[in-house]
Image: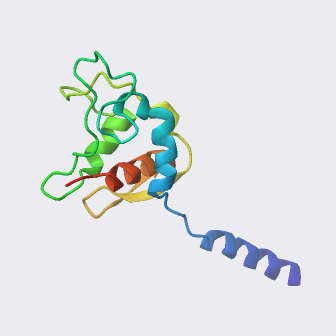
Amino acid sequence: MRTIAILTAAALAACAQTVSMPDAREGAVLYAENCAQCHGASGTGDGPWAAGMTPPPADLTQLTMDSTFPRAHVLSVIDGYDRTDLPGKEMPEFGLLLEGDTVPVDVGDGVLTPTPRPLAALMAYLESIQEG
């Protein structure tokens, strides 16, 4: 009986663990590894590979519209889900790089959406570098 109680307590403790949300620092590392070559270290589109690109890489510090960061749009562009008729459709798809454990992210509609942790981390970083 005591063994069952210990196992039950351990199972409950495992279920009670909270998911830690990624922060901008975690996203900054991923950004430096995957995005800075084109978008530049500061996100303004002046990376070493940007020279001669048509159209030039987007300025990622100017994504906020009407004081709202467009989370759903940013996530869909990064993971390659929707690039039809969008400027920047030339951007490589990073969907395969952004697999793994998911975290609940509010994409702006109040509904928590399971999102791969690296994708959520990149979004947090991009949101942190907005200039307006």
The residue sitting at 24% across, 53% down in the picture is 131
Horizontal and vertical percent position of residue 2: 87, 84
Query: Residue 60 at what x, y percent from top left?
Result: 28, 41
The answer to whether residue 24 is above or below residue 98 is below
Residue drawn 42% across the image and 46% down it: 122
* Above or below: residue 77 compared with residue 124: above
Answer whether residue 1 is visible to the viewer in this image: no
**Quadrant showing the N terminus:** bottom right
Q: Which residue lies furthest to the left in this view?
A: 66
Comparing 101 with 69, the one in front is 69
Rendered image quadrant of residue 14: bottom right
Which of the two residues, 9 or 24, is positioned nearer the viewer here?
24
* Residue 45: quarter of image: top left
Instruction: Using the image as rendered, state which of residue 40 and residue 127 is in the foreground.
Output: 40
Q: Using the rendered view, name the quadrant where residue 39 is placed.
A: top left
Q: Where is residue 81 in the image (x, y as percent from the top left)?
A: 33, 34
Colouring used for the render: rainbow
Q: Is any atom of residue 109 visible in this view?
A: yes
Q: Residue at x 44, y 45 (%)?
A: 119
Rendered position, 32 above or below 51: below
Residue 12 coordinates in the image, percent (x, y): 67, 75
Left or right: 23 in relation to 39: right
Check the picture and name the quadrant holding the C terminus. Answer: bottom left
| Numbered label tally | 0
